[in-house]
Amino acid sequence: MNTTFPKYLFSFFGVFILPTASIAQAPGQPATPFTRQINEEEYRRLDFADSTDYRDATKGFIAPPESDVILNDRGAPAASLKQYDFIRGDAPETV
């Protein structure tokens, strides 16, 4: 039986995937004046009165989930929708 592949897979995971998790958690830098200016100009161009995108995105929507936690077939948490709470509110200046 070839056990080389799993060893390489775990090595890949450890070298490339795990470090990105800590990078994603690192605090960001403040927006530069140029970034703020470009984002403000783009924001002014948007037509918030046009609700076509919102209607398209919610087409077929039946109901929100009953819970913020999605359970697997054994009843254990498989995913949490709370990780997307950062979407609420105003976007940071760097976005």
Image (cartoon, rainbow, N blue to C red):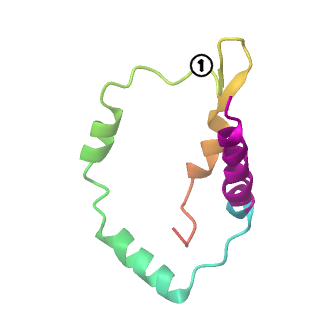
x and y percent of residue 17 in the render? 67, 53
How many numbered tags mark residues here? 1
Asked whether 15 or 47 is in front, the reply is 15
Residue at the image position 46 percent from the left and 21 percent from the top: 63
Q: Is residue 24 left or right of residue 41?
A: right
Residue at the image position 53 percent from the left and 88 percent from the top: 33
Amino acid carrying label 1: it is Glu
How many C-alpha atoms fall within 10 Å of the one at disc 1: few (<14), some, or many (≥20)? few
Residue 15 drawn in magenta: yes
x and y percent of residue 94 in the render? 55, 72
Name the element at disc 1: loop
Q: Is residue 18 left or right of residue 53?
A: right
What segment carries the magenta color?
1-22
Residue 30 drawn in magenta: no
Vertical relation: 22 (above or below) 69: below
The extreme front residue here reads 1
Q: Is residue 24 left or right of residue 34?
A: right
Task: Determine the image quadrant of residue 32.
Answer: bottom right
Image quarter hosting the N terminus: top right
Residue at the image position 55 percent from the left and 22 percent from the top: 65
Residue at the image position 71 percent from the left and 11 percent from the top: 74
Q: Main secondary structure of the magenta part?
A: helix
x and y percent of residue 83 in the render? 66, 42
The residue that disc 1 covers is: 66
